[in-house]
Image (tube, grey):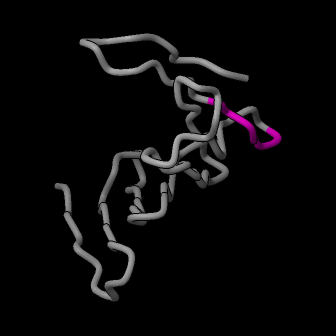
Amino acid sequence: MNCCSGRDRGVPRQEKIIDIYDARGREKHHYWLAANGAVDPATPAIEQVWDDANRMTRILNNFSIIDYTYNEAGQVRTEGTTVTGDTAVREVRYC
């Protein structure tokens, strides 16, 4: 399935290809095609991980991993970012 194609301010057209969904129909993986129809090497693929409560717990690409935790009300409690090649996690806590 594709979506999000178009041209904006002279930027060559890309197409977002969603190629993996989980059993609940949530997007798990997508990548981008360049204007020539080849996989766009400048825009990395994205993978998403979901929990049973339909909350995204992780999103990642070649450059970074972002992990989320949630409170009992389903609001984001923490957002932790790890950049590829670095072992440190930068964490943001929300009230």
The N terminus: image quadrant: top right
Q: Which SS type dominates the magenta stretch?
A: strand
The part of the image, by quadrant, that contains residue 67 is bottom left
* Residue 47 colored in magenta in the image: no
Q: Please state the horizontal and vertical placement of residue 7, each as a whole percent of the image.
A: 39, 11
| Residue visible at 31% across and 12% down in the picture | 8
Q: How many marks?
A: 0
Is 20 one of the magenta-colored residues?
A: yes
Is 60 positioned to the left or the right of 52 in the image?
A: left
Magenta span: 17-23
| Residue 52 image position (x, y, % from top left) | 67, 51
Q: Position of residue 93 (x, y in %)?
A: 20, 63
Residue that lies at the very extreme toward the front in this rendered image: 36
Occupied quadrant, residue 49: bottom right
Q: Position of residue 50 (x, y in %)?
A: 61, 51
Residue drawn at x 24%, y 12% is 9
Q: Quadrant of residue 30?
A: top right
Task: Write the residue at 48% across / 58% down.
Answer: 61
